[in-house]
Amino acid sequence: MEFFKSVWHNRRMLGNLIKHDFKNRYLGNHLGIIWAFIQPVVMISIYWFVFTYGLKAGKIDNSVPFLVWLMAGLIPWFFISDAIMSCSSAITSQSFLVKKIVFNVKLLPVVKIGSALIVSIIFWLLLVICLLVYGYYPDLNWVGVIYFLGCAVALILSLGLLLSSITVFMPDVGQMVSIFIQVMFWATPIFWNKDMLHGKLQLIILFNPFAYIVDGIRDSVIYDIPFCGHYKNGLFFWVFTIVLFIIGNRVFNKLRPHFADVL
């Protein structure tokens, strides 16, 4: 509770740090912030072309256009992967703040998550436009997107506290995180349908917290399934996330006094 109180009391400072971090990520480039959108848009275009014309994945379930289905899975993943990678280096990339005793270093992962969320806003708007073009109009179930974004933030924050503190002492963690992101990208039903798995293979979905988020958002905007329709997976997700947050918080608190010595 002290952590969340600190976030609330420092909300104005956090807002300024998020804006500063967002600008610094693309400062010095001629195209500036445009680079934040070029790579994901190119990736979506390539995946759409390859799977639509190369692999003939025209529609999902004979009803859902592949582009809509793909964007509903890829866009949440762009935010998740970007935020996790940024959070893992939250301490080492802001070492000048770590040495300031009055600053709560534990807020740095929150800054990285906020910065990644700003970048993803444009993509969420593109998803909405794509849905409208294909005849998917807003309804009450779209509120589930907000819930699942909250789930994503909670999971990323829990991972961020753990990874950012360990990275200070083990720089190789950054490379491990990159590999982890690649593995989870293919282990999460972004390009494949969860209904393809049967029997014990369904555990891949149950024990993959990222699958809960991606599937939940896709079901909310495409299949009109309310967010509470995934209560079994949701129960596991929140137990896992809360335990991970407790572990990450304790590890961070233990290592925090030694940050300045290493940096």
Image: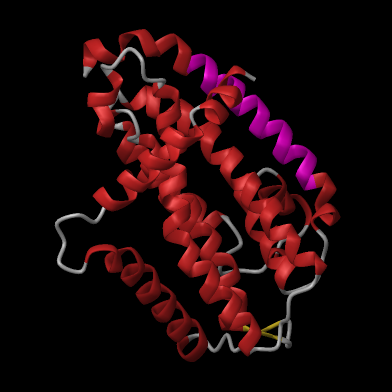
Residue drawn at 83 percent across, 45 percent down: 232
**Which secondary structure is most common in the magenta stretch?**
helix
Tell me where residue 140 sits by quadrant: bottom right
The residue segment tinted magenta is 233-251
Q: Name the one closer to the observer, 137 or 57.
A: 137
Task: Determine whether, in the image, residue 114 is placed left or right of residue 224.
Answer: left
Q: Is residue 179 visible?
A: yes
Q: Is residue 87 magenta?
A: no
Q: Is residue 237 magenta?
A: yes
Q: Is residue 59 visible?
A: no
Q: Name the one closer to the observer, 145 or 231.
A: 145
Check the picture and name the quadrant holding the C terminus: top left
Q: Is residue 156 above or below residue 229?
A: above
Percent across and percent down for residue 193 are 66, 68
Task: Determine whether, in the image, residue 137 is placed left or right of residue 91.
Answer: right
Q: Is residue 255 above or below residue 202?
A: above
Check the picture and name the quadrant holding the N terminus: top right
Q: Name the one closer to the observer, 203 or 48.
A: 48
